[in-house]
Amino acid sequence: MSTKRILVVEDVEMNRKIVRIVLNAKGYEVLEAVDADQALAILQAGLPDLILMDIALPGISGEDLTRQIKANSEWCHVPIIAFTAAAMKGEPEKFRDAGCDDYISKPVDTHVLVDLVEHYLNA
């Protein structure tokens, strides 16, 4: 069985580092992008099995990037989990409307992160 690849789209280095350490320890390959341009370049080079998407990205927002990904027939099946500090009332519906399959709040609970990732990768 091949290693599952997870694209982490997050502009804050410390957040990417935490996610990378946790997911690498579980045997996942972690690809990293700090903005929409890097994320799109990675997607064009080869599809990940799952995307963790920060909503508050510089430039194109994570919400808008999610819409772009879900509108692309080659990429639309990849699960996207919103990764956000803004999980206020009504926000989960907003993320789902943009095309996110689920969300996780920051600061991230690493156990919840692993459970959510494994849920979508084993679905």
Image (spheres, rainbow, N blue to C red):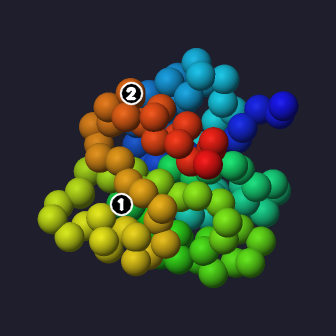
Task: Name the residue type under label 2.
Answer: His
Q: Which mark is residue 30?
A: none
Which residue is at a point 77% across and 32% down the rendered structure image?
Answer: 3
Q: How many residues crowd around disc 2 within 10 Å: few (fewer than 14), some, or many (20 or more)?
A: few
Q: Horizontal and vertical percent for residue 13?
A: 45, 37
Left-right relation of 68 to 4: left
Extreme residue toward the bottom, this view: 71
Q: Which quadrant holds residue 96?
A: bottom left
Label 2 and label 1: CA atoms lie apart by 23 Å
Relative to 28, say whether 6 is above or below: below
Q: Which residue is mark 1?
A: 56
- Dot 2 and dot 1 residues touching (CB under 8 Å): no
Q: Compare residues 50 and 9 and report the one nearer the observer.
A: 50
Which residue is at a point 74% across and 78% down the rendered structure image?
Answer: 73
Q: Which residue is mark 2?
A: 111
Q: Horizontal and vertical percent for residue 109?
A: 32, 31
Q: Earlier in the sequence, mark 2 or mark 1?
A: 1
Q: Horizontal and vertical percent for residue 58?
A: 42, 62
Task: Name the residue type under label 1.
Answer: Ala
User: Is residue 59 at least partly visible in the picture?
Assistant: no
Q: Considering the image in quadrants, where does the N terminus appear?
A: top right
Q: Horizontal and vertical percent for residue 88?
A: 17, 61
Residue at disc 2, secondary structure: helix
Residue at disc 1, secondary structure: loop
